[in-house]
Image (cartoon, rainbow, N blue to C red):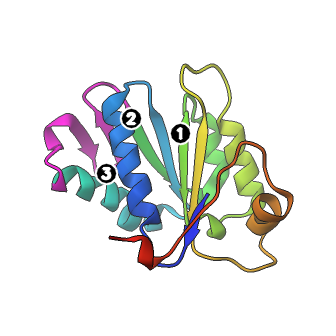
């Protein structure tokens, strides 16, 4: 869990880590999500493409802007999806990393359905990363991760002061 105010570097960090992981190991298979498909195109997908471009990594990645997918020359892959219809995600298999951007926008039911996607045999461990801005005291994320706590979770709060 990475949460904090706007401009605190949460999304940028996760995007950089994603690209680095994909370069280092062909077995990484990412699913990057937001509540809607339209919102992911102008945020997560654009950020990932910008990082690839800024770091002159274009020759190492194939970017399909129509499908909003990224494939590394070594075979690592990333697909993006909106949760407009979470039922469509049931056919997605082989994912070992999931990034939910603006996780506070999704429902607990959506989260539980996504958690089911991280199952099966895999040489890498499974990991789900949630990024979001501070939330209401009544939000389900607070209840599950902060009040009750979830095993094997790590929480990091960032602010704009953490950007150097």
Placement of 53 over or under 69, stated as above or below: below
Q: Position of residue 21 (x, y in %)?
A: 39, 37
Element assignment for label 2: strand
Placement of 8 over or under 155, stated as above or below: below
Relative placement, left or right, of 107 versus 22 is right
Q: Where is residue 62 in the image (x, y as percent from the top left)?
A: 24, 39
User: Foreground mark, 1 or 3?
Assistant: 1
Q: Which residue is drawn at 54% across and 25% down?
A: 124
Q: Residue at x 55, y 33 (%)?
A: 96
Return the mark for residue 97.
1
- What residue is shown with label 3? 66
Give 39 or 152, whichever is nearer the viewer. 152
Picture quadrant where residue 51 is located? bottom left
Q: How far apart are marks 2 and 1 (CA)?
A: 10 Å
Q: Position of residue 19 (x, y in %)?
A: 34, 44
Q: Distance between the residues labelled 1 and 3?
A: 22 Å
Q: How far apart are marks 2 and 3 (CA)?
A: 15 Å
User: Foreground mark, 2 or 3?
Assistant: 2
Picture quadrant where residue 139 is located? bottom right
Picture quadrant where residue 162 is located? bottom left
Can the viewer see residue 7? no
Q: Which residue is drawn at 57% across and 74% down?
A: 133
Mark 2 residue crowding within 10 angstroms, few (<14) / some (14–19) / many (20+): many
Mark 3 residue crowding within 10 angstroms, few (<14) / some (14–19) / many (20+): few
Magenta-tinted stretch: 54-76
- What residue is shown with label 2? 77
Can the viewer see residue 111? yes
Element assignment for label 1: strand
**Sequence order check: which comes first, mark 2 or mark 3?**
3
| Residue 162 highlighted magenta (yes or no) | no
Mark 1 residue crowding within 10 angstroms, few (<14) / some (14–19) / many (20+): many
């Amino acid at each position: 869990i990475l949460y904090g105010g706007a401009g605190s570097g949460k999304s940028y960090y996760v995007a950089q880590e994603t690209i680095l992981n994909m370069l280092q190991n062909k077995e990484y298979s990412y699913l990057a999500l937001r509540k809607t498909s339209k919102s992911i195109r102008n945020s997560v997908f654009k950020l990932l493409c910008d990082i690839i471009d800024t770091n002159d990594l274009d020759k190492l990645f194939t970017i399909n802007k129509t499908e909003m997918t990224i494939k590394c020359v070594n075979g690592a892959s990333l697909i993006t999806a909106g949760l407009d219809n979470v039922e469509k995600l049931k056919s997605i298999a082989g994912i070992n990393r999931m990034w939910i951007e603006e996780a506070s926008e999704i429902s607990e039911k959506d989260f539980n359905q996504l958690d089911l996607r991280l199952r099966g045999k895999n040489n890498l461990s499974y990991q789900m990363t949630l990024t979001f801005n501070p939330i209401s005291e009544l939000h389900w994320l607070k209840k599950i991760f902060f009040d009750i706590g979830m095993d094997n979770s790590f929480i990091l709060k960032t602010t704009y002061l953490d950007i150097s």
